[in-house]
């Protein structure tokens, strides 16, 4: 009897301790049509799902979780990699959060921790920057009806960067992380503006003091970025901007052969990596590149050239897992027909070319990486001019920009079948093949079967080998 009583007391004590570690999140989410709110932890600069809660008919939610560590967490809707509709909070075991999300922002409701009150103060302070940077396509990010550009953004950035208000809670761990977070946050807004399509982009001479002192090398001297919710994407964005500043103009890029272009890209990549000061972050950048590769040959090229930068066991394991996934991926999948119209408004379908190998280039005139692939694609078109290959380029420019697309095609004298899909990522081809980023290439064999929904880019010699192999069949 005494043993049973002792066991019961012990069980109640353990259960009570577990209950005090639970954190509760309650609130309302009155934005969009999403039916679920998700909580993410931050792992190596990426968001990983911890828990989720369905929204009720009146858009309320309530759920609990046990923080595995003290630190930042992200709550929001949509895809994990998107930084839209995501908000940052801080939890220790037992902390709770109550908030209300509206069409443009969020507000805290009820009792909340001093850390989350401080995060909300900062968010309210920089909200105009977030609108102009992240939400530039919405009404909140527009100026005189047009998306914000650097002319109205830079003065506001300098104003927020000059804030001297103390953000101190007395929690030393939080205060240290939060000080770094504010720098990363401002950098993210600034780099997002530079890396997204705008009516006008600045030259380096136009950069304000903040951008001159917050370069890729200035924020990659340690692994602090990996504690930031979008640290991985910020690292990639900084690398993209550095590459863009180093890259030669299209006229100066090597024209032939393809391996010369590949070598040029290799030297460019090394220069970008030199700007990343921390070795672990170099490895994270290599992993980010590996995630975008489509063939095992591309993985071998990457590892051969950059293996020295993959330094942690975790990075080696993750890249190895990616390679295995590519090796084990099915060769063929279901083919879904789609259509587009040419400059003369004639409609073409994917299925119009039986007995032909078809390479589909999904692109847009506003996409800088897409335009960079044009010289290599045009060389391929010339190389296979008299063979059974159809090169179909279909633009995702919005319907209102159809004339802009026509002008671009004529000005650049683009060969191949040039089609207009329209409607961005809502277009028929993007929806059919779940395309979320461009440039994107699809490859079909002579029987009309989909060989791969993620074909190598024309600048990769791997694509030439794939075309040659398909033509022999």
Image (spheres, grey):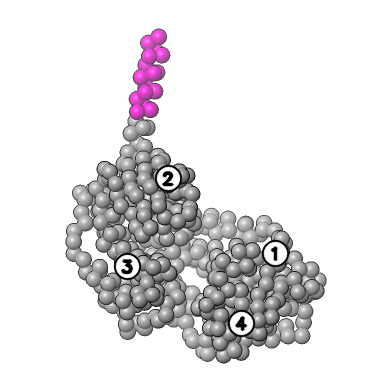
State how far apart marks 2 and 3 are (Cα). 31 Å
- Residue at image point 37% right, 16% down: 6
Per the image, the residue denoted by label 2 is: 58
- Residue at image point 32% right, 82% down: 206
Sequence order check, earlier mark of 4 and 1? 1
Q: Give the quarter of the image for residue 166.
A: bottom left
Q: Residue furthest left?
A: 165
Per the image, the residue denoted by label 1 is: 336
State how far apart marks 3 and 1 are (Cα). 41 Å
Sequence order check, earlier mark of 1 and 2? 2
Residue placed most toward the observer, 383 or 320: 383
Q: Secondary structure at mark 2?
A: loop
Seen in the picture, residue 282 relative to 464 is either above or below; the reply is above
| In the image, residue 14 lies in the stretch drawn in magenta | yes
Q: In the rendered view of the protein, which quadrant contains the N terminus?
A: top left
Per the image, the residue denoted by label 3 is: 129
Sequence order check, earlier mark of 2 and 4? 2
- Mark 2 packing: few (<14 Cα in 10 Å), some, or many (20+)? few
| In the image, residue 113 lies in the stretch drawn in magenta | no
Closer to the camera: disc 2 or disc 3? 2
Q: Secondary structure at mark 1?
A: loop
Closer to the camera: disc 4 or disc 1? 1
Per the image, the residue denoted by label 4 is: 376
- Mark 3 packing: few (<14 Cα in 10 Å), some, or many (20+)? many
Seen in the picture, residue 460 relative to 454 is either above or below; the reply is below
Place of residue 351 in the rendered image (x, y in percent of width and height, measured from the top left) = 75, 71
- Mark 4 packing: few (<14 Cα in 10 Å), some, or many (20+)? many
Magenta span: chief secondary structure: helix
């Amino acid at each position: 009897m005494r043993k049973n009583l002792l066991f019961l007391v012990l069980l109640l004590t353990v259960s009570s301790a577990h209950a005090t570690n639970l954190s509760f999140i309650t609130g309302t989410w009155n934005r969009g049509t999403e039916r679920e709110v998700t909580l993410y932890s931050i792992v190596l600069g990426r968001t990983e799902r911890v828990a989720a809660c369905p929204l009720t008919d009146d858009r309320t939610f309530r759920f609990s979780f046990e923080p595995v560590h003290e630190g930042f967490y992200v709550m929001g809707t949509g895809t994990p990699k998107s930084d839209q509709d995501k908000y940052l909070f801080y939890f220790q075991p037992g902390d709770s959060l109550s908030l209300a999300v509206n069409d443009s922002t969020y507000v805290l409701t009820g009792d909340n921790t001093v850390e989350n009150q401080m995060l909300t103060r900062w968010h309210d302070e920089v909200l105009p920057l977030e609108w102009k940077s992240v939400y530039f396509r919405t009404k909140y990010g527009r100026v005189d009806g047009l998306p914000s550009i650097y002319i109205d953004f830079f003065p506001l950035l300098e104003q927020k960067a000059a804030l001297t208000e103390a953000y101190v809670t007395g929690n030393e761990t939080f205060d240290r992380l939060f000080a770094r977070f504010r720098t990363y946050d401002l950098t993210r807004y600034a780099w997002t503006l530079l890396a997204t399509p705008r009516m006008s982009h600045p030259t380096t001479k136009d950069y304000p003091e903040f951008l001159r002192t917050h370069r890729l090398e200035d924020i990659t001297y340690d692994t602090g970025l990996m504690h930031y919710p979008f640290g991985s994407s910020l690292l990639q964005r900084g690398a993209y901007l550095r590459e863009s500043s180093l890259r030669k103009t299209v006229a100066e890029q090597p024209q032939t052969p393809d391996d010369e272009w590949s070598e040029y890209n290799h030297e460019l990549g090394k220069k970008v990596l030199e700007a990343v000061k921390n070795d672990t972050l170099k490895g994270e950048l290599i992993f980010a590149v590996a995630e975008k590769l489509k063939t095992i040959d591309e993985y071998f090229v990457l590892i051969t050239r950059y293996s020295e930068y993959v330094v942690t066991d975790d990075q080696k394991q993750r890249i190895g897992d990616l390679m295995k996934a590519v090796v084990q991926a099915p060769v063929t999948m279901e083919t879904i027909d789609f259509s587009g119209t040419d400059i003369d408004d004639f409609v073409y379908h994917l299925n119009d070319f039986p007995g032909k190998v078809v390479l589909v280039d999904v692109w847009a005139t506003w996409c800088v990486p897409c335009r960079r692939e044009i010289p290599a694609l045009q060389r391929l078109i010339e190389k296979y001019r008299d063979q059974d290959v159809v090169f179909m380029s279909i633009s995702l420019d919005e319907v209102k920009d159809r004339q802009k697309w026509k002008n671009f095609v004529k000005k650049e004298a683009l060969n191949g079948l040039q089609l207009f899909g329209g409607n961005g990522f809502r277009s028929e081809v993007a929806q059919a093949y779940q395309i979320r980023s461009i440039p994107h290439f699809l490859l079909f064999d002579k029987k009309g079967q989909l060989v791969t929904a993620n074909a190598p880019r024309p600048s990769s010699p791997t694509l030439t080998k794939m075309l040659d192999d398909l033509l022999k069949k």
